[in-house]
Image (cartoon, rainbow, N blue to C red):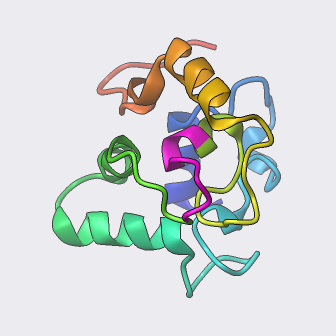
Amino acid sequence: MPAFRLIAIRQLHYDVGEPLWQYSAGVMACTFCHVNAGGGAPWNPFGQALQKGFQSAPTQKFADVLYTVLAANADADADGYPDAVEVFAHTLPGDASSHPERPLAELEAAFEEAGGVKQYAPQKGKVRSR
């Protein structure tokens, strides 16, 4: 898997409960950020938001840019669900046809109860336990 994807999987906790997460394309599809299932250009709206984040802060590490994009509380694909809430629900924040089934208010409450966007903050020098 590409390095950015490996970082994102751990940072977004998609590896939890997935013992072989490093080897599974099903844990986080390339379409999380890309239009094509195989990755590469073009990028979907969420991938474009990450690109803009790198343009705004070119010396930042990927984990920091990812967190900044999620903390902005934007809805890249304009489906009515903020990107961080879609990450929490394991839907694609860059694909308007992929959105949570639960009502937004209910999902936002569960998201906040789980720690809100802060749960996706980069872990500086810490090893996350499982």
> Where's the N terminus, which quadrant?
bottom right
Which SS type dominates the magenta stretch? Answer: loop
Q: Provide residue 21's location: percent of width, then percent of height.
A: 75, 40
Q: Is residue 63 above or below residue 115?
A: below
Query: Residue at horizontal 74%, vertical 44%?
Result: 100
Q: Provide residue 50's location: percent of width, then percent of height.
A: 39, 64
In terms of image quadrants, where is residue 105?
A: top right
Residue 36 belongs to magenta span: no
Answer with left or right where residue 110 lies relative to residue 102: left
Answer with left or right where residue 68 lies relative to residue 31: left
Identify the residue at the far bottom of this view. Answer: 41
Query: Residue at horizontal 32%, vertical 47%?
Result: 72
In terms of image quadrants, where is residue 107?
A: top right
In front: 4, or 92? 92
Residue 81 belongs to magenta span: yes
Q: Is residue 41 above or below residue 29?
A: below
In front: 120, or 130? 120
In front: 70, or 15? 70
Q: Provide residue 24's location: percent of width, then percent of height.
A: 81, 50
Query: Residue at horizontal 22%, vertical 54%?
Result: 60
The span picked out in magenta is 78-85
Q: Is residue 7 visible?
A: no
Q: Is residue 91 visible?
A: yes
Answer with left or right where residue 29 lies relative to residue 4: right
Q: Is residue 12 above or below residue 58?
A: above
In terms of image quadrants, where is residue 67?
A: top left
> Where's the C terminus, which quadrant?
top right
How many numbered discs?
0
Q: Provide residue 118's location: percent of width, then percent of height.
A: 38, 25
Answer with left or right where residue 36 lies relative to residue 48: right
